[in-house]
Image: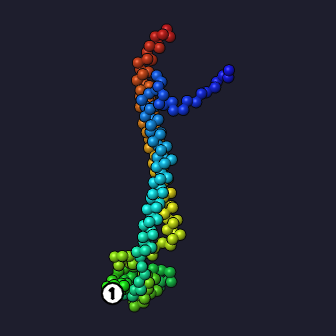
Amino acid sequence: MRANTSVRRPLWRWRRNPMRRREDVIEGWVLLATWAVVVVGAPLTGVVVGQATADGLARQQVERHTATAVLVRTERSPGATVAAPGDRVMGTVRWTAPDGTRHEDRTAVASTLAAGDRIVVWTDPHHRVTPPPLTPSEAATQAAATGAMVSLALAGAAGGGWCAARAALDRRRARAWEAEWRKVGPQWGRAAR
């Protein structure tokens, strides 16, 4: 027979044992719940959030349309120097929607443009100027990244919850051990004499 062999006892926290404490059972259940969240909940939540993000971005691609607008005026700062070709300033633009209604909104325009110039703007269903929708590949990348981040955040939160629960249970065990030692310790001291 071998000496110093250890026997693994899986699920020892749930077995009947005179040494098992209430904290051990709680720790076992918290650990089980943590693993369920990490293995099942986090990936499932990531997929759901990723799909919802993809649906929202696809809806933007359908709802947003281009319109040819006329630059009414730009808002340059009073002490502005000569603008470089890539600089942007806020400007007011006016356009006519397909239904014949006239609209006006503010947007960032190239600093080299002047009042009366024509520009292409993207509009939403409420006829407000909006950024252009993402391309399908950009939308897929953003949806996947959002789903992955949510999945990792949920798994991290579950792990953090596990660590906090474990620390609280360890403090409870330490207090229980101290209380038991205060009861039993003096009895051992008398036996040693």
| Residue found at the very far left of the displayed protein | 101
> Neighbour class for label 1 at 10 Å: few (<14), some, many (≥20)?
few
**Nearest to the observer: residue 98 or residue 157:** 98
146 in relation to 89, above or below: above
Q: Looking at the rendering, which quadrant does residue 33 occupy? A: top left
Indicate the amino acid at tag 1. Answer: Gly
Q: What colouring does the structure picture have?
A: rainbow
**Nearest to the observer: residue 129 or residue 143:** 143
The image shows residue 43 at horizontal and vertical percentages of: 49, 52
The image shows residue 138 at horizontal and vertical percentages of: 51, 69
Instruction: Determine if residue 138 is in view.
Output: yes
Classify mark 1: helix, strand or loop: loop
**Nearest to the observer: residue 132 or residue 167:** 132
| Residue found at the very far right of the displayed protein | 1
The image shows residue 165 at horizontal and vertical percentages of: 43, 39
44 in relation to 34, above or below: below
Residue occupying image coordinates x 42% and y 70%: 59
Residue occupying image coordinates x 39% and y 78%: 123
Residue occupying image coordinates x 44% and y 21%: 181
Count of labels shown? 1
Q: Is residue 61 left or right of residue 125?
A: right
146 in relation to 7, above or below: below
Residue occupying image coordinates x 41% and y 83%: 67
Instruction: Determine if residue 80 is in view.
Output: no
Q: Is residue 139 left or right of residue 75?
A: right
Quarter that holds the N terminus: top right
The image shows residue 32 at horizontal and vertical percentages of: 47, 40
| Residue found at the very far bottom of the displayed protein | 116
Q: Which residue is mark 1?
A: 100
191 in relation to 156, above or below: above
